[in-house]
Amino acid sequence: MDALTWFGLVAVSAMLVCYAFERRGRVWVLGFAASCALGSVYGFLQGAWPFGVVEAIWSVVALRRFMG
């Protein structure tokens, strides 16, 4: 696996872990927002721009949940 694939694997794995623990505290919501942002970067770098756009939207939604 190349570095980009590893980056995507880490980003999506972090997203899954943070999503699973969201109810345990607000810090997990922030972690989910950050991992979605990383997933978005991965999607754009990979050339899968629809994935990048959707992950960017999820990042904003999670960040708003964290702040609100």
Image (cartoon, helix red, strand yellow):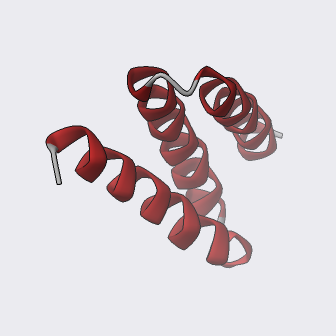
Residue in view at x 65 percent, y 27 percent: 56
Q: Is residue 5 above or below residue 17?
A: above
Q: Position of residue 27 (x, y in %)?
A: 56, 58
Q: Is residue 2 above or below residue 1?
A: above
In this view, the residue in front, 3 or 64, is 3
Quick one: quadrant of the N terminus?
Answer: bottom left
Q: Position of residue 23 (x, y in %)?
A: 74, 75
Q: Is residue 43 left or right of residue 11?
A: right
Q: Quadrant of residue 64?
A: top right
Q: Is residue 9 left or right of residue 29?
A: left
For the image, the number of numbered tags is 0
Quick one: quadrant of the C terminus?
Answer: top right
Residue in view at x 49 percent, y 47 percent: 35
Q: Quadrant of residue 14?
A: bottom left
Q: Quadrant of residue 24?
A: bottom right
Q: Position of residue 9 (x, y in %)?
A: 36, 57
Residue in view at x 44 percent, y 37 percent: 38
Q: Residue reaching furthest left?
A: 2
Q: Is residue 59 above or below residue 15?
A: above
Residue in view at x 60 percent, y 43 percent: 33
In this view, the residue in front, 29 or 7, is 7
